[in-house]
Image: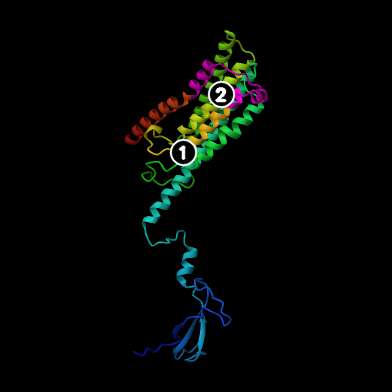
Amino acid sequence: MKLKPMADNVLLKAHEAPETTVSGIVLATTNKEKPMIYEVVSVGPGTKDVTMTVKAGEKVVVGKFTGTDVTKNAADMVLADDNFATIVGAVGEGRRIYDNIRKAIQFLLGSNMSEVISIFAATLLGFTILQPVHLLWINLLTDCFPALALGMERAEPNVMSRPPRSARESIFAHGVGFDCVYQGVMCAVLTLAAFFIGHHMEYGVWTLTNSPDGTTMAFLTLSMAEIFHSFNMRAHRASIFTLRTPNWALVGAAAASLALTTLCIYVPFLADAFDFTAISAAEYAVAMGLAVLVIPVVELVKCVQRAVEKRAGRA
């Protein structure tokens, strides 16, 4: 069948450019923007405003950059595999990343707030609970690695059942701001309790004064409370005991922090550098017991928050 173009249209026949040069160099042919050579088969008569300048048999170069490619560049989302299920996966991954950012921020803010409250309260009461080198150790080791591990947390089970969030929504929305405050206060109270208990276990009296044992126990309690608290951050409202997959990066960070913190207390030259005293096994157990209390306390608060949100949803 012979085709005849109309008006100012031109009928072209694809004529692929050579893949190998005269010297034998192989040319890449996968670049979409690389021009392609066409042979003019027939030419339309033209129009009143357009005079046809090409003739049949001539070769022309036409770019392969089509209107479809331009549309892709202007689109908000491009499906590379032509599968609409990819959109669901992309949305889920985006929500997971955003949730993990919020978890890391909540963890870091709550941890730093507990340190500030502990130092401020001790200053008002007239004793030293922690020294600057202790805070530096906690911020660099105890806070940094668990926060990074929270960034690798898997998506929560209800990540795709939540309605879309507003672009103007604060990162502290849905109770995150309140959680930062009460969790910071909780860790500070446990740290102060560890100091007073450590001083009493060593000297048998309750007094507001500097205490090597109290400082050591406060350091251990604060460090490990923040580590245990990082496990609370794995789920915003759900119980961490309902999560089916472990975060091995977080487990590794917790184990490393426990080992290094213990070494700082019991290795002589490290203890001297941090001005620690080797506490007894009973004092060590009490400090760890106070630290682990962050898990049941947060679980209890989450339970109350879930009940309140459920009741508000029914109202």
Residue sitting nearer the eye, 79 or 279: 279
Image position, residue 51 (x, y; %): 51, 90
Name the outermost residue toward the left. Answer: 314
Q: Which residue is mark 2?
A: 220
Query: What crowding class fits label 1: few (fewer than 14 Cα within 10 Å), some (14-19), or many (20 or more)?
Result: few
* Depicted 19 relative to depicted 226: above or below: below
Q: Secondary structure at mark 1?
A: helix
Query: In percent of the image, x 44 and y 25: which residue is there?
Result: 297
Mark 1 or 2: in front is: 1
Query: In percent of the image, x 48 and y 47: which residue is there?
Result: 167
Q: Identify which amino acid the numbered label 1 is placed on.
A: Trp
Q: Which stretch is magenta?
A: 262-291
* Depicted 53 relative to depicted 92: above or below: below
Q: Earlier in the sequence, mark 1 or mark 2?
A: 2
Q: Quadrant of the N terminus?
A: bottom left
Q: Quadrant of the C terminus?
A: top left
- In the rendered structure, the answer to whether residue 260 lies left or right of residue 30 reads right
Residue sitting nearer the eye, 177 or 287: 287
- Can residue 248 be seen here? The reply is yes
Q: Main secondary structure of the magenta part?
A: helix
- The label on residue 248 is 1
